[in-house]
Each structure stands twice: as C-alpha cells, then as structure tokens.
Image: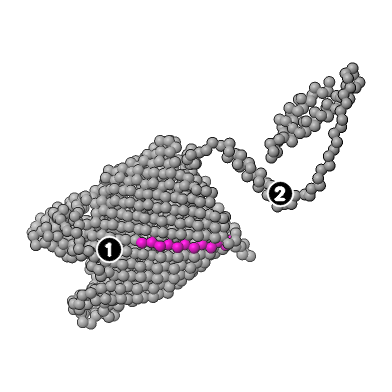
Amino acid sequence: MSNVKAPRSLRFDAAIGSADDTGYSATKVSAVASLIAVASFSGAEAQQSSLPPVNVDAPVARPRPVTSKPTSDQVRARNALRRAARRSNQQAQQAPVPFPNAGGLPAERDRYADPAAPYKGDRLQASGKYPEPILNTPKSITVLTKDVLEDKNATSLKSAILSTAGVTLGTGEGGNAFGDRFFIRGFDARNDIFVDGVRDAGVSVRENFFTEQVEILRGPGSSFAGRGTTGGAINIVTKQATTENSFYNMDTTFGTDRTKRVTLDVNQVISPTLAIRAGGLFQDAGVAGRSYITDNRDGAFVAGTWKPVDAVKISGNYIHTELTGIPDFGVPYYRPSTASTAGGPFPDFGVNRNNFYGFVNRDFFRTGQDIGTINAEVQITPHLTISNKTRESRSTQNYIGTLPESPTLAAGAPFTSYTLTTNPQSRYQVTDVFANQTEATYKFNDGAGFKHTALAGFEYDNERSSIDKYLGLNSEALPGGFSGSGSLSGVSVFNPQYTNIPFPIPSGLSGLPTKLTVDTKSVYVLDSANYNDLVILNGGVRYDDYNIKTSGYGTVNGVANVFGQQQQDYGMPNFNLGVTLKPLPNGSVYAAYATSSNPVGAEFDGTSIQYGGLAPVLNGNSSQIFGPEKNKAIEVGTKWELFDHHLLVTAALFQTEKENARESMNVTAATATAACPYPAGTTGTVSCISAGAAYRIRGIDLGVGGKITDKWSVFGGLVLMQSEVTKSNIPPANTILYTSNVGLPLANVAHQSFSMLSKYQLTDMWEIGGQAVYRSKVYGGTFLAANQGTSIPSYWRFDAFAEAKIDKNWTMKLFVNNIFDKRYYDALYQSAAPFVLEAPGRAAYLVVSARY
C-alpha cells in the first residue's frame, strides 16, 4: 500500500530540516502535512474495500490578520535580537573558565609588536604623530618590545639602553653622577626621556616593572617632541589596563649578587567597558663585583580603562617608585706623568675592582618618582578624534656620595702607594612637572589620491625644580676630624682605609636652594600623506615659547648668601620633512630632514652652563645669555620585512650638525678674548663660557628584529660613527693637550657599537639564547670635545639564558650576565682626572614566572 512510505518520508524530512528561532523544524511541519494528505488518500481507498468507511471533516480555514511588510529598521532590530539570543545560548552551554588566559589564550598581548614575531616592533605608541607602521616611517627607530626586555632581563631603563647599539652612558659630578644620562648619536639626551609621550623632566633612575616597551627614536625630533632631541629621544610605554581579558602574573628572581626580586602584574576585566590593572615591585640586591653597593627598590602602579560608549575612552594611571641603597661613584683614573704611558682606570693597573672609596656609614641614595596621568579620547566623527592628556609628576634625587679624585704619588714612593682625596657630593633635588597636551587627529582623502592623517596640537609644560645640599658631613673619628664640606686626603687607592669610619647624622640641608622654573607653550601641526602605499609624504612644524627663570644664593666679593636671579625667553621654530617610496609592499626607501634646538638651562640637573643648566647671575660680569644651539640632520635609509614579513631589517646613513654650541675655557688678563673677556675687578684665573662652536657627526645605522625561522628570533644593531669639532672659539694656547679643539672627536661617544640578542626554540619546552655587546673606546672631555686626553677602553660582553616552560602556567629562566666576568666601564667624568663608573661583574639569576 502506498501509505507504508509515509514514516520513511517523515524521517528523511526531519533529518534534513533546519531549525528556526523557535527551535522547531520547518520540514517537520511539511512532514506532518504530508502525513495528513497520505491519510486522506488512504481513506478514499478504504471506501472501495471491505473496511468500514471513515468520514473526515475538512478543516475550516481561519482568516489571517492583515499585516504590513516589516521595515528595514525592524528587520535589523529582529536580527540583532536573534544574534544576542544565540550568543546567550552558547555562553550558557559553555563551562565557566576561572582564568581566561589559561590554555594558550594571550595573557599580555603586545599591542605594538608582530604577534608571530614578538622581537619585531610594528608600530609606535604615538599613532597620531606616527600613523604609519615603522616600515613606512622615515626615521631610524629601535623598539625594545616586551619580549626583548624580558629576554635581556632588563630591570631598569639603564640596563635596557646600555645593551642597545648607538647609545652611550654619560655621567656628571654632583647632579647626575649615577642617574640616567644617555648619549644618542653622540649628543646628550638625559632630559629627552618621555613617559607615554610626555617629557619626564629631572634626572632619575627609572625602573622597568611598569614598562611595556621602550622606543628609541634617533635623529632630531623637535617638531614631534619639543626642545632638545638632537641625537634622539627615548619614550617609555607604560602598562595599561585592557578589557580584552583578565590575567594574573608574578615573577620571582634570585641572583648571585644577593638579588631577591618579586614583581606582580594583575589585569581584571570588570565589565566589557571597564578594566583595572595593578602591579607591585620589591627588590633587595647588591651589585656583582662591587663591595658595599646596594640596589633596593620598591614600587607600585595602578591603571584603568573605561569606555562608556564607543566614541569615548578614558584611561589613566599612577606610578610610584622608590630606589634606595649605597651609591657607586666609581673608581679613580690613573693619569701617568709621561705621555709615553697610557692612562686608564686604576683597576686596569692592579687595583682590586671591588674597591669602594665612599663611607658606608654616611653615603646613601633615595631616588623616587610619582607620576599620575589622565587621558581622554573622543571620536567626534569617524574621521576626527580629539584627545587630552594631563600629567602631574614629582621626581626626587636625594643622596650623599663620595667621589674618588686627584690620585697622587709621593716622589720615590712605590706605585702601590698612590693616594687620593674623597670629595663628598650631596643633593636634595625635587622636580615637579605639570603637563597638558591637547591634540586633534583628522583623517581625510584629498582630490589627488592621497590619504592624510593630520594632527594639530597644543602643549603646556610647567617644570619646577629646587636643588639643595646637605651640611654637617664631617666625622670626628680621625685625629683632628675632617669636614664633609671639604675632602679627606691620604686615602689609599689600593686599600682604602676609611670605608667604615663612623659619621653622625647630617645636620640637615643648607636651606639655600637653587630654584629653576621652565614654562613652555607649544603649538604644532603634523601631516602624513599616503598615496596607494606607493609614496608617503610627511612633514611638520612646531613652535616652542620657552621661558626659564632661576634664582639662588652665593658669595660675591666675600659676602655670603647673596641672592641672584636670571630669566631668559626664547622662541624656537623647528620643522621636519620626509618622503618614503615603496618599491614593494614589504620594503621602503626614504629620505628625511629635521631640525631641533637646545636652549640654555634645558637640563634640569645642571646648575651651571658646563652641565647644560643655568646658574643664577650673582654679579654683572657673568652673564650667561646665549641663544639656543641649532641642530639639523639629514638621513637616508631603507627598511625591509623579510621571511613572511616577520623580520624587519633597516639601514640608514645619517649626518647631524650642531651650531652655536657652547664651550668653556679658563682665561686670565693675558689670555682673554672677545668671546671670553676678563671680568673687571677679578684676579687669577676665571672660567668663561662662550658660544659659537660647531660639531658634526655622521655614520651608518643598521638594525634587525624579528624571526628568521619559526624557532629562531634575533634583535640587534650596528652603529658606526665619525665625529669632529668643526669650529671653536678657544685659542690653541687654552687647550690642555692639543693645539686646537678643531678636528677633535666628540667625548662621551662610543663611535662603534654592536649588540645582538638571539633566541632559539629547541623544543616545545626549552629555549636557549644569548646576547653579545660591543662598545669601542670612549673619550672624556669638556662639553662635547674630547680634549682631556682621557678614555675608557673598548670591550666585548656576552650574556646567556635558558628557558624551560614547565606547563602552560609556569616557566623558569636562568640568566648568566657577563659570562666571562669581563672588567669594563660604563662612563667617565669630563675632568682631566676623572672618576670612572665600573660595570657589574658576572652574575646569575633564576627567574620563576607564573602566568594565569
């Protein structure tokens, strides 16, 4: 009979049916209708058989209400409700995950690096000022990504920078003897350090526990960043809260140099629009190869992100760090009496490298930072965004330290009888900064086919610093005692004998501080124009209205505590131009030109022209009114992404020239010049500052970062430079060892530097890696000229590490720094008998990391 096929048809239709939003199948309804039809047909046949007839009443059709066709808005609303219902149903069927990043989900996604090659930085934080990828940006840029910082085991900005090619560490006498003073492409950048794009004025020692990545931008950048930035700038990108997912991280470190360090980093998603991130730091450490030196650190940060609507984003953070311990002012420098014998740091002539020339019962340092920032972004239209960033910060430098100076040897005494004087240095400096940046970014297409990203901004910065010193640094432990305001002589170079003598508590500050205030109002306009990813043009102009005031106390004609003050005001216009050509999608060739300005007093740790500062004028004969130093630079280069775009290779030729540079000389009545006149009413030798010198530095900059294979990562660079003084107002008779400054190389510059970090993944569990660092000889000298005849030698340093991934949450990493325990030096002071900063010796660290 035909009705036996009905069940098979029903099963087939139900199997291929698709569910509607009610959960029922449309083909199920069709199958039921077919069954009714079949039953009706069977009933008709039954009337012709012996079976009794079956009468079925036909259903009465009910009239349907008349409805109109839904509008497009109703259709969109209905579809949105259906999608939301499906998501809710899927979430209800999934088991809850207590730790969202467990099982391979990204805990800390690097926002700026290539996800498949985390050694390769793709973009800069300042997307408005640098809208193009690094590949298309006409500038030499080195990005130390999160993974690079971790594999360098860089716990401070100094340790990260000093293992990067093209950057050299400098030092000062009192203001910045051990702080972050960097030279980029040969020029001082100690006040060209930024935190999230805002200048971090005042010299400090910066920790890395709150740092996501470090960006080193080489070449003049005043149109982007303001004053200074002659050789480049450093931008610290801080950790921000993210609504992507929650994570809980902890790193614990144990080291052979007595290091015990713990860092915490927690991000918690409160809602899809709100997230909070917090972290902490504890460190108790020594320094490998240096006796008595301690390096203790504490800190915390908190950050928040809130996006109440799609067009508004509000973020902020607060950072607190405090570094304490016994400071290291280095070792003395051996200056032979005959020119035929080369000089150098005393440890290279048999002195124990561990020797400490300070006083453990007196010397200390306490460096702190408090930085609070609020940033608001409003997307007015899909093409126009307004942002405002407000920052209030305070940095403190508080220390008493001891300089090992002026080594001498009595006539006829053996070499091991060298003695020196220990010169106390002290400072209590507080620097407060208020900064506000307002920027508008507008994206548009012009009629010529270019896609523009234009940015206009206004910035106001108020920087205030108070610099005082300690009194009562004397000790009565020695016969007759000695005053801390002077120097203790007769200290043995080979066996310093007064390290542990007692000192009373210092009697306090002098109460006569030098105060500096810098007010800067800036306007700038930048534009980047992209024509079909074939030609990219960029340019910008900036005008800085820079005003500096200083006041302080001193002695004039034997009268102490005389108050003096000085004020200077400059208008500084600067600009940049760049063009990038892209012969292939993975490559670029570019040329760029930029200018910058260095006004007097721009360095906040300096209280005199010699150190980039501005001292109070205490009489009418020591005016320090000089116009800004002017800098210009040109750079041509190329950048290529290789190996499936996971390796960025860069090469650049550059030249930077400085004009109206300042220099110093000692004059008497007989040696005075028009540039350095002899002040009336003075006697003896007088230090004079003049302007009008010129310097030039040129070189080649090579860089690489990313993955060569899926298992092999590399990051490094090579920088080769040549420098010279091209103009000087100092007469030949006033130089120390040379007939003239002209033709001399620049001081504080490693003219050849190389670094390479490499890592290889052996298995899913094990990775091994290492780092090689080379620095050529560095010369000492006043200002930038290498005119003191002093230097520290070149060196190679090698590090290694091995990492074991225990499971998806736990890893262990072993670092060995300075494997061969190389004795080398980071920096030297500019005087003829300098103190020298000695680098750490060999040390091993075990880092245990938890990621949840």
Looking at the picture, how far across and down is residue 549, in whole percent? Answer: 35, 73
**Start and end of the magenta stretch?**
383-394
Looking at the picture, how far across and down is residue 698, in whole percent? Answer: 39, 62
**Residue 122 left/right relative to 475:** right
Q: Secondary structure at mark 2?
A: helix
Instruction: Give the residue drawn at x 49%, y 65%.
Output: 438
**Circle on res. 75:** 2
Q: Was residue 386 drawn as part of the magenta stretch in this picture?
A: yes
Instruction: Give the residue drawn at x 18%, y 77%.
Output: 558
Residue 607 in sight in this render: yes
Looking at the picture, how far across and down is residue 157, in whole percent? Answer: 36, 54
Q: Residue lying furthest bottom in this view?
A: 680
Mark 1 against mark 2, which lies toward the viewer?
2
- Of callouts 1 and 2, which one flags the residue occurring earlier in the amino acid sequence? 2
Give the residue at mark 1: 428
818 or 374: which is nearer to us? 374
Above or below 647: residue 18: above
Quadrant location of the N terminus in the rendered image: top right
Looking at the picture, how far across and down is residue 281, in whole percent? Answer: 35, 49
801 or 93: which is nearer to us? 93
Instruction: Give the residue drawn at x 54%, y 55%.
Output: 308
**Residue 269 left/right relative to 600:** right
Amino acid at circle 2: Val
Amino acid at circle 1: Tyr
State the image quarter where residue 366 is shown.
bottom left
Q: Residue lying furthest top in this view?
A: 50
